[in-house]
Amino acid sequence: MSADPTGIIRAMGETGESQLADNLARVQERIAAAARRVGRNPAEVTLIAVTKTVPWERAQAVLALGVRHLGENRVQEAEAKYAGGLPPDVTLHLIGHLQTNKARAAARLFQLIHSLDRARLAELLEQEARGLPRPLPALLQVNVAGEASKFGLAAAEVPAAVDSFAYLPHLDLQGLMTIAPLAQNPEDVRWVFRGLRELRDQLRQRHPSLALPHLSMGMTDDYPIAIEEGATLVRVGRAIFGARGEGPPRS
Ligand SMILES: *Cc1c(COP(=O)(O)O)cnc(C)c1O
């Protein structure tokens, strides 16, 4: 698009620019270190910079720093922010709950839907994706920890959901996503990430034709643990942009 990201960074001022670059570099280092700890290639892990509540200018600034994946949790906010378009090599991820009446807009705006969690939504996305040049990539959201406050299929519901959604011709089921419970110590939610990976491995055995390459798991507080357990997509907001509604972290 026409915006000059470098000029925007300059407009943010020296502090904003260097702080954002430092934060991003630190996250990238921790991603690589976590991957190496378990003998994984760091290139297997994709960082999604979560730009919910983050102004457009700062999203542009992380793009200028080389990030190529952005995540938003609300269709309307994403439409407003990115209505002017994004560079063609940038992937926009929907990481939040998707209401049925937003399925059409979501199918057009996002290149990966992380929150497929019910049959009705699968049907609607399938319909919307008929008009797209290629099948719409999606992940099944799984509520591994069974929290009442969270969206997602129960782990026990996932095999049946895969049986019915995986073979819709215009949906491209690429794996699973989960959000871990809040925890003081990220080690306390390792079992959630391990559970998602084990579920994916079981699904692969049951459906040898499905690669299910992606595990979307890990946020600011727990992404290194998620990577140790096999995450291929980590969704990081605060560690890059600072606490939402405030400036970047001081240290
Ligand atoms: C906000 C959000 C994130 C990023 O959270 P941080 O703690 O800021 O890293 C990741 N995933 C989902 C689904 C979110 O809503």
Image: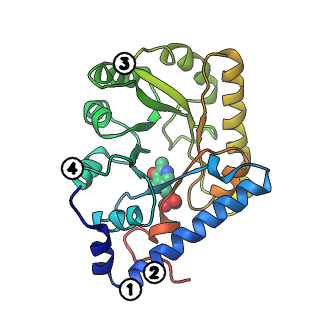
Residue tagged by mark 3?
123
Q: Which residue is drawn at 30% across and 19% down?
A: 130
Distance Cα–Cα, label 3 vs label 1: 48 Å
User: In the rendered view, would you say 203 is above or below 89?
Assistant: above
Label 1's element?
A: helix
Q: Do the residues labelled 2 and 4 touch (CB within 8 Å)?
A: no
Residue 193 in view of the camera: yes
For marks 3 and 4, the one nearer the N-term is 4
Residue tagged by mark 2?
18
For the N terminus, the image quarter is: bottom left
Residue tagged by mark 1?
14
Q: Do the residues labelled 2 and 1 touch (CB within 8 Å)?
A: yes
- What is the quadrant of residue 194 in the picture? top right
Q: Does the residue labelled 3 lie within 8 Å of ligand 1?
A: no
Q: Does the residue labelled 4 lie within 8 Å of ligand 1?
A: no
Closer to the eye: label 3 or 2: 2
Label 2's element?
A: helix
Closer to the eye: label 3 or 1: 1
Distance Cα–Cα, label 2 vs label 4: 27 Å
User: In the rendered view, would you say 74 is above or below 3?
Assistant: above
Q: Position of residue 166 (x, y in %)?
A: 51, 18
Residue tagged by mark 4?
83
Identify the amino acid type marked 4.
Ala
Estimate how packed mark 1 is, as few (under 14), some (14 to 19) or many (20 or more) residues with alpha carbons within 10 Å. Answer: few
Q: Where is residue 40 in the image (x, y as percent from the top left)?
A: 74, 48
Q: Are marks 3 and 4 in contact (CB under 8 Å)?
A: no
Identify the amino acid type marked 1.
Glu
User: In the rendered view, would you say 166 is above or below 24?
Assistant: above
Identify which residue, 87 or 93, lies in the foreground: 87
Q: Does the residue labelled 1 lie within 8 Å of ligand 1?
A: no
